[in-house]
Image (spheres, rainbow, N blue to C red):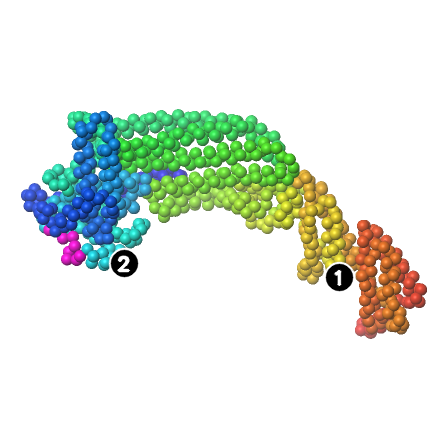
Amino acid sequence: MLSVVLFSGLISSVWSLAPSAHAGGTKQFSPSTELQQNNYIPIAEQPFYNDLERRYNIWTDNPIGEVVGNSAQETLLNFYAVMAIVGNRADEISQSYRDSPGLFWNEETQHEIENIEHLFEVAVKALDSSQFPESVRMHLADESAIEIKHLLDYVFYTAIEPIKLFEGETNQDITAKSLDKAYIWRLPGTPISLTNRLGTNETGFGYLFSAETTNNASQMYKEISPRLSEMTGSKYKTPTFYKDFIHTPGHLVPPKWYVAIPQWGHDFLEQEILGGETIFQTTFGLVALLIYSFALSVVGTYSLKEFAKLAGNEQSIDRSIEGGLLSESTEFTSTYWRISISIVPIVVLTKFVEVFIDDYLNFTGAPLIVITFLFEIIYFGLLVSLTYITLEAAGRSLRHRMHRLDNKSSSEILARRRQVSLIMPVCRTLAVASGIGLIYRLLLMLGLSPSAVLALSAVPGLAIGLGASKLLGNLFAGLAIQADQHLRIGELCRVGDTTGFVRKIGLRSIEIQTQDSVITIPNATADENTIQNYSKQLGREECQGLSLNIDITDKLTSWQISELIQLTKNYISLHQAFVSSFVSINRKDACLVLDIYCLLKTKDLDTWPEYIELREAVLKRTLQYIAQVRLSRQILRLGLRTQADLIERFPAILERVVQEDPMLKFNGAHLRISDDCYNFILLYKANHDTHGGFMNALDHLNERIIRKYEELSLQIPYPTKRFISTVNDSQ
């Protein structure tokens, strides 16, 4: 699928850049018959000549500034003057090869070449080349700049009427009129147009040769090129500028060794044979391609052999489990590194050969586009492969190194297991993200617009949506789980209806060790369900969490609730297996709920019997405490005829009865008056170690209370009034 997309992008981009693709909707040059009659106005008599001459002198004396002006006319004249200077100086340097010995330009000449290169770059900035593919934008812009220079030569030297650039308006008037809106200015009688930067990606105000003019420069140049040789005898005319540029190696000025070749050698080497490229360019280009193909085949063969070794050695990997980690052999990991290292030279060579063909041999036109696109595809393909293999090797190396580290405690083992489990998913995620980014960048380099890239991505997206939606869903859910760390290896969690210790977190699924088996849960399913992590309640990684929610059906007073919470906290704090706890009372529907959250210490994080034993111990003791606080509040009844002084002394009597047992603590006796008796609510606390001890103490307490009733001649009143009322109502 990727190759289809890239090939489609290559074909569409080359087609869009072909000159014929733009010829239909643009006014073209028609070579004038007047030229043959020499019935044209000399450029020195044109209305703009004085302004052109002034700008030529300024750029000659001070080659610093911007060609782009605040009006279209200013940009046009600056561009024409600078390009004339560049063309003339480049030709002068080429003709001066006999003035210095050696096969290379001397330092002074090299400095002059750098100056005209700078001027040329400044002039090229006056072109809107945004519609060219990014990979060949610089090269095509250079060609278009020289072609536009020749087009202006033709216009200025074949004009039979005065060329009025300003048409009765001053430069300031035109500038002011176009400051606030997009403005297109067309050179009178020509398809050459300039436009301001409004609506483009450029910053700042100024006029550029329009994208239409830049793209169609090649086609327009072909129409007027036969006439260029007839235009001589002026410093602004550069009839051989374009041919010297495309037929010779180097950029504006060829290497000195090439210039020194005899004329008959130039005549032979500069014959066009392949897509407009010369014999010299084609020959050395083929040699470079052959050398590169050989190097690519060598590296490819070596990589395939190494991958075959990986496939063969995969079954012989040391699969001994230490701390729950898979131990890999060093040789297995080293193979990835060898493949990665072998790709690096070919990546460098790919870019070197591309630069050699494009910049040094100076390929132009369609061959330039094809060669550049081909090498860009290979280059980015190698980068994607290199990124994936390098991250895979780095992840395996880091995992292997961390696996071999000495561990001193169970907490360090757990921490290392969690760290190691993240290494490969993170590395592979980075590899996938980098690959997607590189492919996206490649498509943009090939000339596809961002909207077109998104449109092309819809095709594999549809295929993925139909066939691999679940796989991608699990993948992204796994990435989310790894990033958010809702659960980690070694933690006790409840995922949906499954409770257990997390054994593995992969990119596709999670493995949970339950009491009787290992359950694999897809990441998407885990992400959709509620995750309850018992190991994160108080943030201690060396402990596991324990959670209990106990319904209380008895009606308890606030004193009993406080007593229950305190008893539960005391028990957990005194237990050696627990680190800390949190106990609270909540209301759910019509009953109370006792919520217990605590952390327990454990060395073996996968010991279910130990965990269950501790959980049962907490549950059992808590139920006993609920019964205890319920029984620690008793209602004692006295008849209405009981003497007042006895009622006054009765709380003190009960206090002495309770304190006869040193494990009981009197907490109050409160008087309540009902219709048939006096009610004393007796409250006390018990400090017994066992529930059985508390029950025995309760029996003895009740016995002492009964004896005290007998001693005081007190009887427990019978609720006759309440009974009679109930009977009458039923009748």
Q: Is residue 591 above or below residue 536?
A: below
**Can you give x and y, in whole percent of width and height, for residue 331 in the image?**
52, 27
Residue at image location 41% in from the left, 35% down from the top? 383
Residue at image location 43% in from the left, 28% down from the top? 342
**Can you give x and y, in whole percent of width and height, for residue 694 in the image?**
83, 53
- In the picture, which quadrant includes the C terminus? bottom right
Residue at image location 45% in from the left, 31% down from the top? 340
In depth, the one of 130 and 660 nearer the eye is 660
Q: Quadrant of residue 519?
A: top right
Magenta stretch prevailing secondary structure: loop
Residue 414 as seen in the image, left or right of residue 56: right
Can the viewer see residue 23 in this picture? no
Q: Quadrant of residue 481?
A: top right
Q: Residue at label 2?
A: 180
Q: Which residues are magenta?
A: 162-170
Local packing at callout 1 (Cα closer than 10 Å; few below 14, some 14-19, many 20+) is few
